[in-house]
Image: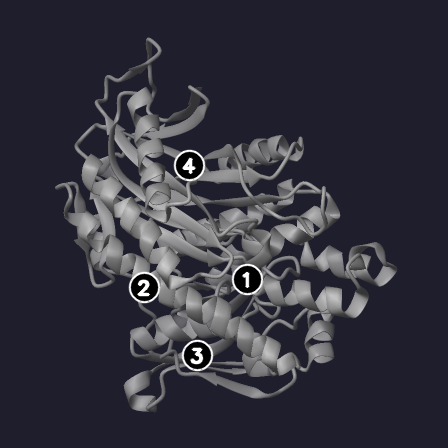
Amino acid sequence: MAKAIDDAYQREVIGIGDEGSELLAKICAPTLNFHTYTRVIGPEKRVALDIPEGFKVFVHSTTARHSKDRRKTGASLVARLWKQSWHIQAMPLAMTDIIDSRTGDTKMLREIAEGMVKGAEEFNLAIINGENAILGDVIDREFNLSGTMISIAHPAIEVQGVKLSREGIFDLEGSTYAYFTPEKEIGEEFVVANSDGIGTKTRFYQRRNLWWPSINDFLAMILDDQAKVRGAKVKVASGVIETNGISSQFMECQRYMKERCAEMGILGILQKALGNLNSYKPDTPAYNIGGTAVGVVSEKNLMNPLVPNPRDSVIAIRGNPNPRSNGITDKRAKMIKYLGDNWHETELGKKFLEYLAEPSTVLYPVFRELVNNNLATGVFHMSGGAYKGKFARPLAKNKRFARISDLFFPDWREITLLGASGTSAETAYGKYPMGNDGFITTDKQDEAEAIQVINNHGLQARVVGRVFDARKEKLTGLELQAYDGEVVYFPGK
């Protein structure tokens, strides 16, 4: 029974999700030609925006207006984002989108995307990134749709008669905007963006009746991805918090979002919206958060992405024990199976909830410092797909192979859930962080300095393996020794 659940998760959430993401990217690709500001740069074919010298960049998010026609719903998101730009007399350039659905049905995704593309064509917009998340019964209709717009305006723009500084945040007409001015002279030549969301981990925070710590999960999902772009500096984190009813907790989320981002030198905004969501029990407030990180990067760095070198050391990183924000659907099901619908009210359940609702470790600050100081040749965070998707795959793509062992041990509650359900080590490391939040690769002579930087961020680190040339080893991807001693191999292909 447990094996079937694990297979179903990888097939129906990870597998179908990847298939849907590829479909969405293909449908939206023609929009990259809708104006001259969009470029595709470097070996990784990174989509970037070339902003005119001195112009201000505005970032703002909203949700779609739902109708029975999926295409109309998709088009409405574009129109609502455009309207936000119109309110500040800015020119919209590009948008991102997040589709949170019950099933990830490809016909549904195609129709939503076709509607967005039609709207993008009407307003000459590029759809530069998106997130396809399958959230099951968390969604109380077929899908929820939100997005973020990147707009630009002349340096002398005024909002309500006030001239804007180089960067900041303001509210207007019920929307929140963040803005900044790229400084090309210091390498902020292009604007890049990536989107993601918390997923179903919100159910744990709902059971705990404490939402704001989950902002760290949201930030880990969007910031850690951008940290993989060599030299990228996140300027704005913009998201939407959807709720199914009245709750004061969303205000705490908005407050913490701004404060937490400010600690990292980022402008953080969170737009409130009504979302059709289900909680873990009727008549209980539910919420969901998704959005986009918008950053700046030089053309030189886009042309020279991070690539681990043969003989580089692999260093594991961990913060407080946490499950990050992926593979949560399985954990929710297991807790209900073993301890009942109200498992969080039992003595044992409370101990598990302490772990399950522990926020993700945000690795962006330490990743960025390591990369900027040439102490990391590659950075990897164990979110969606974990060791299989976030570590083995990029290694294989660069014709590399790594062998690792002596990893940080998983939390006892993680091991208990795995043992109770009979989950294999291969399945576990293909979905979960298993006690290790992330990894970097570094030159052997830089090991000690890299570990010191990691420790300075309040995190633990140790050398756990080595990188090899895949062609010489005739192996690609990753080989690891699991917590129980089993050797697991992910080819990354």
Mark 3 or mark 1, whichever is nearer to me: 1
Q: Quadrant of the N terminus?
A: bottom right
Instruction: Verify CB contact (< 8 Å) between mark 3 and mark 4.
Output: no
Q: Quadrant of the C terminus?
A: bottom left
Numbered mark located on residue 422 in the image: none
Q: Secondary structure at mark 2?
A: helix
Mark 3 or mark 4, whichever is nearer to me: 4
Q: Which of disc 1 and disc 3 is earlier in sequence?
A: 1
Q: Which of disc 1 and disc 2 is earlier in sequence?
A: 2
| Residue under numbered circle 4 | 65
| Residue under numbered circle 1 | 326
Name the residue located 35 percent from the left edge and 50 percent from the top edge.
Answer: 112
Numbered mark located on residue 22 in the image: 2
Name the residue located 31 percent from the left edge and 51 percent from the top edge.
Answer: 113
Q: Is residue 301 visible?
A: no
Q: Is residue 104 left or right of residue 377?
A: right
The residues bearing labels 3 and 2 have C-alpha atoms spaced at a distance of 32 Å
| Residue under numbered circle 3 | 466
Q: Is residue 305 left or right of residue 171?
A: left
